[in-house]
Amino acid sequence: MPGFPNLQDEAINALQRYLFNGEDITISTQEGSLTAQPYRFTGYRRFVDPEGYPAVGTPWGTLHALDLSRGEYLWQIPFGEFPELAQRGLKNTGSENYGGALVTAGGLLVIGATIHDRKFRAFDKRTGELLWETHLPYSADATPITYRYEGRQYIVIFASGGKERAGSPGAAYVAFALPKKANGK
């Protein structure tokens, strides 16, 4: 979100009072009332190299597992890649990713999220070891869901490609049935 350098102290104080105390007050500024402050979205400005890749060191995206009771990382791996770079031998670059992971009772962490390689992956939640991956028709920038039907566990992901570089048109829900061993039976 871009900054608002035009907000004066009185306006900032009013915002703080609203956020912290729920006080909805209207004040006047040189630009008008606080509620009439314009919001300007100036777009995302990415820091990229001349080829359009992130202009910082790799990995450009990571997947982490945390032990919340100790506040420590259990594991961390590069997550995602640019297929054209992988073809040139530059693997494990990581990439932008949008969407969350789902963890099953059987210990699988499943996630789409990577927008350039169109992959859907399953990891061992304890070690981060990649157990399975497949290509989707579009990138899956959503969080998967799971359900059980007639004793079998399924995982579904929505793939739309909306954030891909090429902006692939189309969308699909893709469902996978887990093997009986994976869902604890």
Image: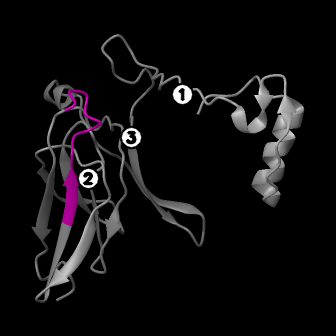
- Please give left or right for residue 153 compared with residue 15 in the image: left
Q: Crowding at label 3, few (<14), some or many (≥20) Cα neighbours within 10 Å? A: some
Neighbour tally class for label 1: few under 14, some 14-19, many 20 plus, Cα within 10 Å: few
Residue 161 among magenta residues: yes
Seen in the picture, residue 7 relative to 71 is either above or below; the reply is above
Nearer the observer, 6 or 101:
6
Asked whether, in this view, residue 65 is left or right of residue 92, the answer is: right
Can you name the residue that lies furthest to the top here?
A: 50
The stretch in magenta equals 156-167
Q: Residue 109, percent across and down? A: 30, 65
| Tag shown at residue 112 | 2
**Counting residues from the N terminus, which is met first, the one under dot 1 or under dot 3?**
1
Comes first in the chain, label 2 or label 1: 1
- Residue nearer the viewer, 123 or 118: 118
Residue of label 3: 61
User: For the residues carrying marks 2 and 1, which lies nearer the camera in this image?
Assistant: 1
Residue type highlighted by circle 1: Phe
Which residue sits furthest right? Answer: 10
